[in-house]
Image (cartoon, helix red, strand yellow):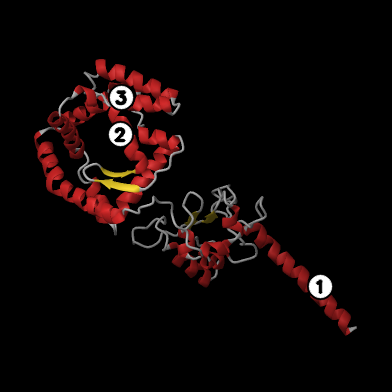
Amino acid sequence: MKGKICRIGKACLFVALCAALFPGAQALGHLGPHGRASLAVPHPSDKTPENPAISRLPRVKERDPAVELERISRSQMEKMDQGRLVVAMRLGKSLDFSRDARSVLSARASTFPMMEQDDAGKSGLGDLIQLSAASFEDEKVIDEPEDWDEDVQPATIADPLEPMNRVFFAFNDKLYFWVLKPVSRGYRYVIPEPFRVGIRNMFTNIAMPIRAVNCLLQGKIKGLGRELLRFVVNSTVGFFGFVDAARIGMHLEAQDEDFGQTLGVFGAGPGIYINWPIFGPSSIRDTFGLAGDFFVDPLTYLVSGTGETIAVRGGDRVNRTSLTIGDYESLKKSALDPYVAVRDAYFQYRRSKIEK
């Protein structure tokens, strides 16, 4: 009799627990389409979440979201780019979290730069908690979080000539601060900005064959048509390219194409990194590309003589530098190692241009 009463009591206790847990599970989340738990907390002023998209974190089922968030370290979060994992943490008064859970969430929120700051300088904890990872392509990132502890090295370019490249980088750095920047600042002081922009437009218009030929080689027929139309409009209405009339009146932007990108589209890798004196950052592929563009550039045939060539191309360099003074200084100031920062920025920029 006593055993029967105990069994009945256990059954009642189990039913009571299920009844208590079901509303909480229904409010906090449900399994997503791939079998992973998701978290969606309603907005205090509405019965439906602000964001109807399903929010998911790996292995969150039947766990306190604050504890699960604390389990994932900051370094692990940083290994997942913001395009694949968006973390937005806002905590409202109506959410029934324990004091420990609130302190954990507040501490975790303060470690992410994407959190907004209020007027008092504290983390802006609002009225919604949302943990979203809606666009995962690599299932291992979700299903095997233990792999997150492994070091993930970002893609970069090989640099076996780093000692020599650093010497050339130092040379170019001194050349910029001691020669190019002072000359450009004096030039900027004498020549008004509209005229400097117009001179840059003229050089851009003259270099049209470089962009047009590489658009053709890459199969970008629309880009080729835009370049030809831009050249006709700017050379006539734009006073020989001094005014970018095609961009102003027809919204036709110049196609930023060169032979180095064409080689990349054809499958040529960058090779190794080279920091050339005067010319700056480059690679084996882009060095060949620069040589190819040289034979297509009209200035190669319009300007004869070494002195005239140096004067014309040097004038173009000074004019363009006068319009961008401060960019290199900002990059150098914010970088722990300016050489590495310039190298990686160059590699990422060139790769993004080829992938377009």
Where residue 130 appears, as percent x and y from the top left, is 53, 55
- From the viewer's perspective, is residue 235 above or below residue 203? above
- Which of these two is toward me, 125 or 56? 56
> Of circles 2 and 1, which is in front?
2
Q: In terms of secondary structure, where does tag 3 sit?
A: helix
Residue, x 53% and y 67% (percent of image)? 71
Does the CB distance between marks 2 and 3 fall below 8 Å?
A: no
Identified by mark 3, the residue type is: Met
Label 2, label 3: how many angstroms apart (C-alpha)? 16 Å
Residue 339 is situated, as x and y percent measured from the top left of the image, at 28, 54
Q: Looking at numbered disc 2 in the image, what kind of residue is underneath it?
A: Ala
Residue wearing tag 3: 208
Of the residues tagged 2 and 3, which is closer to the observer? Answer: 2
Local packing at callout 1 (Cα closer than 10 Å; few below 14, some 14-19, many 20+) is: few
Which of marks 1 and 2 precedes in the sequence? Answer: 1
Residue 107 horizontal side relative to residue 250, left or right: right
Q: Establish if 272 lies above or below 245.
A: below
Mark yes or no: residue 237 visible.
no
**Residue at x-position 39% and y-position 38%:** 353
Are the residues at dot 3 and dot 1 in contact (C-beta closer than 8 Å)?
Answer: no
Quadrant, the N terminus: bottom right
Q: Residue 291: which numbered mark, if any? A: 2
Residue 6 percent location from the top left of the image: 83, 80
| Pointer 1 residue | 11
